[in-house]
Amino acid sequence: MRHFFHGVVVAAALAGAAGARVAAQQAQGAPPPAVVPPAARVAAPIDMAGTWASVITEDWQWRFVTPIVGDYTGVPLNADGDRLARQWNPEADVKAGQQCKGFGAAAIHRLPTRLQISWVDDNTMKLDFDLGTQSRLVYFDKTKAPGARSLQGHAIGEWIDLPAPGRGGPVGQPAAGARAGAPPAGAPAAGARGGRAGGEAAGPRAGGLKIVTTNLLPQYLRQNGVPVSEKAVVTEYLDVVPAPDGAQWLVLKTQVDDPTYLSGWYQVSSNFKKEATAAKWSPTPCELLPRLKGTATQVPRQGGE
């Protein structure tokens, strides 16, 4: 009899605990639905679509022409990179069908080219360059598997420097505490014709684009044979900057990391100006820019000096 009463007490205690858990779960309510991030095109903090022309106001001696062999000023080449660069033979590249090695992802933005930016779908952006007729797809889906190695590589994009939650909220989502259907903070009143209350012009949305490109074929950092290996990683940051005259500028900052041929980071910044139309868009094959005459012995400067 004593064992019977002991079993009844234990069963009652377990039932009470289970009931308490159920009651607690009911009090908490159903778990919130999973947050589905907006598509990359919807979440874009800046509009980069259109045709952009490179504006070269510096380093023209390495960007408008093909430098002579041995002029690697500003490039942190290591000993292996310097040795390979001095063996550059453009005629051999042409015979091997590798005349586009100077138009890969590591260098194309430094050349006097036009850039067209468009969307293939809501999560894939396309970069087209008319010089050398190059194209690169930028995937915002980080799970996208790379294909075969190429000069333009496998590029993954992400929006960065977006407003923090609670201060305007993530792009494409209302701020915390906002009423359903209410305009976002800072939006013009209903019926307003653009701008903000009081006539203040709406400022640009915060944020920019980061692109990390890998899976590259061996290529050149400059058209005079500065080598880039297949282990290189090209990281780019793109921002749109409006000018006082209404023009739109694209600032493209690039960092090339190559453990094979570089002793440190190679970092540059390039500027593009938006064109109203694509009338000047003119794709051309991969051909060397005009070559300067000279030999390596006439250039005392070497990698990084």
Image: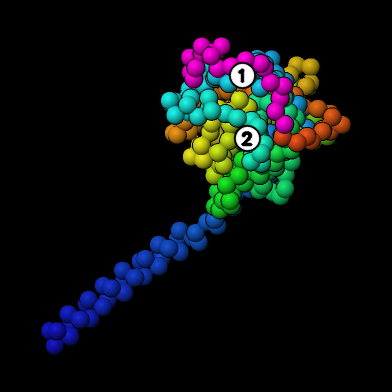
**Label 1 residue SS:** loop
Q: Is residue 175 above or below residue 199?
A: below
Q: Residues within 10 Å of mark 1 (few under 14, many from 20)?
A: many
Q: Is 292 covered by the magenta stretch? A: yes
Q: Residues within 10 Å of mark 2 (few under 14, many from 20)?
A: few
Q: Say which residue label 2 marks.
A: 92
Image location (x, y in percent) of residue 131: 74, 32
User: As drawn, is 122 to the left or to the right of 30?
Assistant: right
What quarter of the picture does the N terminus occupy? bottom left
Quadrant of the rendered image containing residue 195: top right
Image location (x, y in percent) of residue 225: 58, 28
Image location (x, y in percent) of residue 138: 64, 43
Number of the label disc, if any, that sits on residue 114: none
Q: Main secondary structure of the magenta part?
A: loop
* Three-letter amino acid code of the residue under disc 1: Ile
Q: Which residue in the rendered view is the most extreme toward the bottom?
A: 1
Q: Is 257 covered by the magenta stretch? A: no
Going 84% across and 29% down the picture, which residue do you hit?
A: 280
Taking depth in this image into account, of 237 and 109 the one nearest to the observer is 109
The answer to whether one can see residue 232 in this image is yes
Q: How is the image coloured?
A: rainbow
Query: What's the magenta region?
Result: 287-305
Going 17% across and 85% down the picture, which residue do you hit?
A: 4
Going 28% across and 73% down the picture, which residue do you hit?
A: 14
Q: Is residue 148 above or below residue 95?
A: below
Q: Which residue in the rendered view is the most extreme toward the right?
A: 279
Q: Say which residue label 1 marks.
A: 68
Image location (x, y in percent) of residue 292: 67, 17
Distance of label 1 from label 2 (alpha carbons): 16 Å
* Three-letter amino acid code of the residue under disc 2: Ala
**Label 2 residue SS:** helix
Taking depth in this image into account, of 275 and 28 the one nearest to the observer is 275
